[in-house]
Image (cartoon, rainbow, N blue to C red):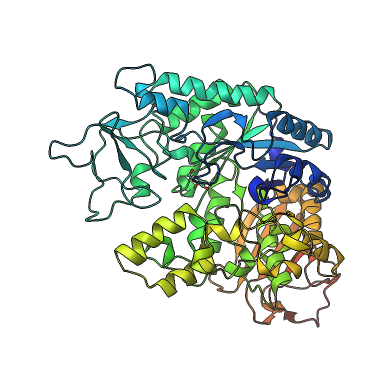
């Protein structure tokens, strides 16, 4: 059974640590979120995805979980969370939680017990290996946060595997008891009213049990592709579906970092009974220099032709074989107006332009907190950043390998660092942007007095009001959910344009993703009988003599057929 409510939905993502601090300790919390439920509801969204709130030492901002069933005291109590779920439900908002089960925190009691010996109840909960006869690590696998994926444990005299931070040991999914515990915790939260799951790096849960070296990577341990999609991945995900998702009608969106559209089809085709949607990373790599030595820190300007190609492949590949999860921002991504748009003279226009591209595609759009007011990347100094990924990568590329200068690394951080999206939410122009009366855990973006919810609401160029229109449009028009998709002008480097068709209805979406003024007639045949459905330049109709497609202009245009 799957009610598929998510196909009509827009989902708002809350990063609790940075959303709203109600008790003034510098951390966002559950009561802070509860206080803002009316605001979230006012956007017109249907559901909220909450990043991890569970007990955690916060080495990786809550993705290192020490207790899956208990709320971390810094966010409040379990009762607060139950109240949030209840109040959200009363407002008609569903709740999606984060399921982080590729690994746990090393502080989780399962790991503490597992580390004690090779023959206790928890011994096989994690992936332990002996050192090789010459004392070296079990294989050459690297962690996604740089360095080795293996860590020596003195107590147990073995290495354990960690795909991410040293403090995030990977669970052993080969062990059926581990899997059952995961299903149990999912049922526990279902019983509390949770409606679905965002599944952290779910494509990594199965590991090649031969643990072979990554080939052809002299001196390079980082190969996420080889480590993803282990041989039993589909089997395990299908089991999650059978044990929990299907019987309890829970929505699922899996994080699938290395997946291309063809892989995604295997994960989300309803016939296969695995997941409802996946988050790909593919389209987010359009500003990564191919073949660079420094991974994602070798940046380039956004390649719009590539963006169109990738998003179109996903639209085409999943048509009738699954469903897209649509996003540009989340807690691991930078702010779009700064990253790919123009966060100075065209901040409103570029924020709404990218929003139009995304929300008019087929799929379920996700809006990340602050995206709806056009928040921007801060120009921080290196010492201001908090993220474990940034710090470990700095040590690797700038300090150890010296393949990138500190200045270039900082420039890249300004463009793509995960911390760009994690600064406190900007509510108003009071101290700390109205996020907290205490000093926040992470620096507030210095542009907060110019960019905040209150000011946006008062502006004639309100990004949030544009989002409200987009969300309403999706709810009111089946064409955005069900219409066919056809990309126009695939090679045009500045304009993203496509058609959606449902029966006799045809919508053309034309979005200028550049600072240049272009010729509208090149992209659209303006007809007397046609109408403007949405415009970020407040156009209500098009005159045939109106020839300009303005910088970052977005138009949704309906042709009466
Ligand atoms: C994906 C999460 O989104 C990210 O924030 C985290 O660092 C990694 N998974 C590891 O858990």
Along the line of sight, which residue is nearer the eye, 142 or 353? Answer: 142
Q: Position of residue 542 (x, y in %)?
A: 82, 74
The residue under the point 51% across, 30% down is 272
The residue under the point 65% across, 81% down is 516
The residue under the point 61% across, 29% down is 70
Identify the image quadrant of residue 426: bottom right
Q: Position of residue 170 (x, y in %)?
A: 40, 35
The quadrant the N terminus occupies is top right
Left or right of 178, for residue 29: right
Left or right of 29, for residue 183: left
Instruction: Answer yes or no: is residue 147 visible.
Output: yes
Along the line of sight, which residue is nearer the eye, 127 or 259? Answer: 127
Left or right of 458, for residue 513: left
The residue under the point 53% across, 57% down is 418
Along the line of sight, which residue is nearer the eye, 474 or 236? Answer: 236
Identify the image quadrant of residue 254: top right
Identify the image quadrant of residue 123: top left
């Amino acid at each position: 059974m799957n009610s598929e409510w998510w196909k009509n939905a827009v989902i708002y993502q809350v990063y609790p640590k940075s959303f709203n601090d109600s008790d003034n300790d510098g951390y966002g919390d559950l009561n802070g979120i509860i206080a803002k439920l009316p605001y979230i509801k006012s956007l017109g969204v249907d559901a909220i995805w909450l990043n991890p709130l569970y007990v955690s030492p916060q080495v990786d901002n809550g993705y290192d979980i020490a207790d899956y069933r208990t709320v971390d005291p810094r966010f409040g109590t379990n009762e607060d969370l139950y109240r949030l779920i209840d109040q959200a439900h009363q407002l008609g908002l569903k709740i999606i939680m984060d399921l982080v089960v590729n690994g746990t925190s090393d502080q989780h009691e399962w790991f503490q017990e597992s580390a004690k010996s090779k023959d206790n109840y928890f011994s096989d909960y994690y992936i332990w290996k002996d050192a090789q006869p010459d004392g070296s690590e079990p294989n050459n696998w690297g962690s996604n946060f740089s360095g080795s994926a293996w860590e020596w444990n003195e107590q147990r005299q073995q290495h354990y595997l960690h795909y991410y931070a040293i403090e995030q040991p990977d669970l052993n999914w080969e062990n059926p008891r581990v899997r059952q515990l995961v299903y149990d915790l999912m049922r526990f939260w279902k019983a509390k009213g949770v409606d679905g799951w965002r599944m952290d790096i779910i494509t990594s849960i199965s590991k090649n049990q031969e643990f072979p070296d990554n080939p052809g990577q002299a001196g390079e341990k980082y190969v996420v592709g080889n480590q993803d999609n282990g041989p039993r991945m589909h089997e395990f995900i299908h089991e999650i579906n059978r044990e929990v998702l299907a019987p309890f009608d829970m929505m699922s969106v899996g994080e699938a970092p290395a997946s291309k559209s063809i892989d995604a089809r295997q994960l989300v085709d309803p016939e296969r009974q695995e997941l409802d949607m996946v988050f790909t990373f593919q389209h987010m790599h359009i500003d990564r220099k191919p073949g660079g030595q420094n991974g994602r820190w070798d940046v380039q300007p956004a390649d719009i032709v590539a963006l169109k190609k990738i998003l179109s492949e996903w639209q085409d590949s999943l048509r009738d074989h699954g469903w897209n999860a649509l996003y540009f921002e989340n807690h691991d991504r930078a702010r779009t107006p700064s990253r790919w748009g123009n966060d100075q003279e065209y901040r409103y226009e570029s924020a709404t332009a990218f929003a139009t591209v995304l929300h008019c595609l087929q799929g379920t759009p996700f809006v990340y907190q602050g995206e709806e007011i056009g928040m921007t990347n801060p120009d921080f100094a290196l010492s201001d950043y908090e993220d474990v990924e940034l710090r470990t990568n700095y040590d690797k590329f700038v300090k150890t390998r010296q393949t990138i200068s500190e200045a270039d690394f900082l420039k890249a951080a300004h463009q793509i660092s995960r911390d760009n999206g994690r600064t406190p939410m900007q509510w108003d122009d009071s101290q700390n942007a109205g996020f907290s009366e205490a000093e926040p855990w992470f620096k507030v973006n210095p542009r907060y007095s110019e960019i905040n919810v209150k000011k946006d609401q008062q502006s004639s160029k309100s990004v949030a009001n544009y989002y409200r229109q987009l969300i309403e449009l999706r709810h009111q028009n089946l064409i955005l959910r069900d219409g066919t998709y056809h990309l126009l002008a695939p090679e045009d480097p500045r304009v993203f344009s496509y058609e959606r068709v449902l029966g006799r209805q045809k919508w053309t979406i034309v979005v200028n993703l550049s600072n240049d003024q272009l010729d509208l007639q090149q992209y659209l045949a303006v007809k007397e009988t046609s109408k403007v459905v949405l415009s970020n330049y407040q156009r209500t109709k098009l005159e045939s003599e109106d020839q300009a497609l303005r910088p970052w202009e977005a138009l949704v245009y309906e042709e009466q057929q």
